[in-house]
Amino acid sequence: MKILLVEDEELYANQVEILVDRIGHQLIGVCDSSDKVINVLDHDEPDLILMDVHINGEYDGIELASLINKDQEIPIIFITSLRDDLTFKRAQRVGATNFIVKPFDQLQLERAIDLAVKKPKSEPKDNDISNIGSDHFYIKQSGTLTKVGFDEIYYLSADGHYCNVHKANKKFIVRISLVQLADKIPKNFFLQTHRSYIINKKKIKKLNLKENTIDLNGQMIPISKLNRAEVIKSLGLVLE
């Protein structure tokens, strides 16, 4: 199993790396800040994240987990030296898969990982997309077809083999991957900014090329390094 470790104490990170190796899993990286984690998730998807609560960067571990959970269903085990109820309750609210307190041994970590990967994922609703036209498609829900105009959609986000369709105040989970849907929808409406995001170009409020984000009416969507040049070209921007 591919595991990403988020830990800003180098000595402790080395100890956890040894434990992960002994258990028999693959550590794909060690990050000490929220920024580095976001960069890793741009091009890789671990099977599990071991997340320290106190890390460097713009977000602490719990805030970062909340951001990750919006778009990716990756089990997260929090590791912390804190034993207070507030930290535990914050972790609960963002859907922590497990929570272990430092120091822990190999058996504790192994059991936490086993419980995390065996925990059933939430099943998306059995929705399908059909009848894709030039400016709309239909979402089938329990035998009912709901017409969704492209001008109603703010963005699409990946969710494994499923895809989230985000409107202003509603989200549909549909049974098609983002890659498959990208091939079926018109390019004049939509633009891929990241491997996990496709946006409606008409919904752009602000573009921040310094932070590589797009503001869709308050929802910040990332621009990956791989997609940055295409985003700039598609929007007809000239950079001096």
Image (cartoon, helix red, strand yellow):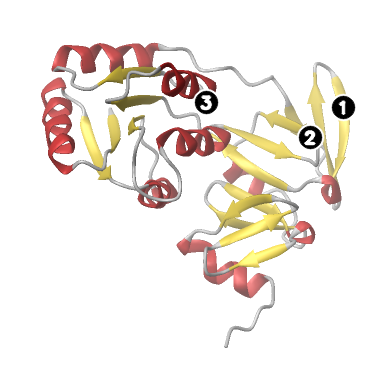
Q: CA distance from mark 3 to mark 1?
A: 33 Å
**Crowding near the residue tagged with mark 2, few <14, some 14–19, many ≥20 C-alpha atoms within 10 Å:** some
Q: Position of residue 99 (x, y in %)?
A: 35, 18
Residue at 14% over, 25% down: 19
Looking at the rendered structure, the kind of residue marked 2 is Ser
Left or right side of 175 for 225: left
Q: Residue at x 30, y 26 (%)?
A: 79
Q: Residue furthest bottom?
A: 240
Q: CA distance from mark 2 to mark 1?
A: 9 Å
Give the class, few, some or many, for how many residues have Cα within 10 Å of label 3's Cα (few <14, many ≥20). Answer: some
Examine the rendered structure and indicate whether residue 125 appears above or below residue 11: above
Q: Earlier in the sequence, mark 2 or mark 3?
A: 3
116 relative to 215 in the view: left or right: left
Whether residue 210 sits left or right of residue 49 in the image: it is: right
The disc at residue 130 is 2
Give the vertical position of 28 relative to 57 (above or below).
above
Whichever of labels 2 and 1 marks the residue nearer the N terminus, that label is 2
Q: Name the residue nearer the viewer: 152 or 34.
A: 34
Residue named by callout 3: 94
- Mark 1 residue type: Leu
Mark 1 packing: few (<14 Cα in 10 Å), some, or many (20+)?
Answer: some
| Badge nearest the viewer, 2 or 1 | 1
Q: Which mark is residue 145?
A: 1
Q: Which corner quadrant of the image does residue 215 belong to?
A: bottom right
Q: Residue at x 38, y 19 (%)?
A: 84
- What x and y, as percent, mark residue 105? 14, 17
Between circles 2 and 3, the one closer to the viewer is 3
Give SS at disc 1: strand
Query: CB atoms at circles 2 and 1 under 8 Å apart?
Result: yes
Answer above or below: position of 45 versus 217. Answer: above
Q: Position of residue 85 (x, y in %)?
A: 43, 16
